[in-house]
Image (cartoon, rainbow, N blue to C red):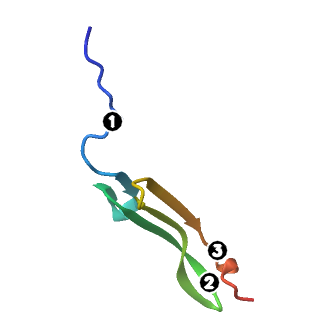
Amino acid sequence: MGRELDVLSAKDSRKFDVECSAGNAGELRVGTDSVCVKVGQRVRMDGAEEIWHSIGVYAKEDESGNLVIRVLVFNPDWDGKE
């Protein structure tokens, strides 16, 4: 009987694994202790185009040792402008 291989087990001390595919711009795969990722999109506001960060992903270890991932969603309409 062969030894079972656990393919999902952590192989090192990293707390988070990040994989990103950004089309023609390339790819990223890293292990790390904390993460901050923002995804922006082109929007037109007040007659001008700008990049608006719509999603933020923040991951870190908290004071109690828990690994926490926060996903924030932003919208230009929620920015308080009327």
Secondary structure of the residue carrying tag 1 is: loop
- Mark on residue 75? 3
Label 1 with label 3: CB-CB less than 8 Å: no
In percent of the image, x 42 and y 56: which residue is there?
64
Secondary structure of the residue carrying tag 3 is: loop
- Mark on residue 44? 2
* Mark earlier in primary sequence (1, 3): 1
Residue 57: x percent and y percent?
48, 63
Residue type at mark 2: give it. Arg
Residue type at mark 3: give it. Asn
Look at mark 1 in the image and give the residue it sits on.
9
Residue 5: x percent and y percent?
29, 25
Q: Left of 31 or right of it: where is 53?
A: right
* Foreground: disc 1 or disc 3: 1
Using the image as rendered, state which of residue 42 and residue 14 is in the foreground: 14
In percent of the image, x 42 and y 53: which residue is there?
67
Q: Which residue is outermost to the front?
A: 64
In percent of the image, x 46 and y 56: which residue is there?
68
Within 10 Å of disc 2 (Cα), the crowding (few <14, some 14-19, many 20+) is few
Quarter of the image with the C terminus is: bottom right
Q: Left of 36 or right of it: where is 76?
A: right
